[in-house]
Image (cartoon, rainbow, N blue to C red):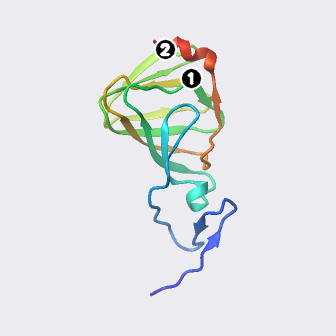
Amino acid sequence: MTVLETKRTRTGSIAAPHKASVIKGAAGYRAEQGSDYEPGVSAETVGSSSLWLGKITIPAGKRTRAHVHEHHETALYMLSGDEMELWTGDQLQYRDIVRPGDYMFVPANMLHVAVNRSAQPAVFIGCRNEATAQESVVLRPEMDCKVP
């Protein structure tokens, strides 16, 4: 049996400095834009300095608020659900349909809204190059009415 020294990071999480970490699902939260997050790898869970990885859910019949992520890119993979609409562009003029098995990429500062019109939750694995739970979200409430 090997005993490893652990350290407490600045955020209070515990990490072993010379060993990889296995993370059990952390407590979820509702992000200010309206999606549900369950962090796996983050600053809070393992002391990550530049990476967030977790599960993101858009509940059935719900949508996010119009928003941008000022300082980070986001990559997502749709695990389950029926389909979801992704609206992007300066005036939210572009509509794409996302289905299970599809990947999505949202650049930094890209205005977007996710809409789940189905009766099933849309579930994603998501990754971003910002490690904290409180990501750099800027809500754009004046644009919420642009998406039917």
Quarter location, residue 83: top left
Q: What residue type is labelled 1?
A: Ala
Camera-side residue of 122 and 75? 122
Q: How many labels does the image show?
A: 2
Q: Circle 2 sits in a helix, a strand or a loop, which is it?
A: loop
User: Do the residues under discs 2 and 1 have CB atoms within 8 angstroms?
Assistant: yes
Q: What residue type is labelled 2?
A: Val
Quarter location, residue 115: top left
Which residue corresponds to the image point at 57% horizontal and 61% vertical from the top-left? 46
C-alpha distance separating marks 2 and 1? 9 Å
Outermost residue, right side:
10
Few, some or many C-alpha atoms within 10 Å of disc 2 (few <14, some 14-19, many ≥20)?
A: some
Few, some or many C-alpha atoms within 10 Å of disc 1 (few <14, some 14-19, many ≥20)?
A: many
For the question of whether residue 74 can be seen, the reply is yes
Which residue corresponds to the image point at 50% horizontal and 66% vertical from the top-left? 21
For the question of whether residue 110 can be seen, the reply is no
Camera-side residue of 109 and 12? 12
- Say which quadrant the N terminus sits in: bottom left
Q: Which of disc 1 and disc 2 is earlier in sequence?
A: 1
Quarter location, residue 76: top left
- Residue 5 image point, x, y percent: 59, 79
Figure check: 8 above or below 65: below
Q: Circle 1 sits in a helix, a strand or a loop, which is it?
A: loop
Residue labelled with disc 2:
147
Figure check: 59 above or below 39: above
Figure check: 38 above or below 137: below
- Say which quadrant the C terminus sits in: top left
Residue labelled with disc 1:
66
- Residue 12 image point, x, y percent: 65, 63
- Residue 71 image point, x, y percent: 65, 37
Which residue corresponds to the image point at 31% horizontal and 35% vertical from the top-left? 100
**Residue 97: mark:** none
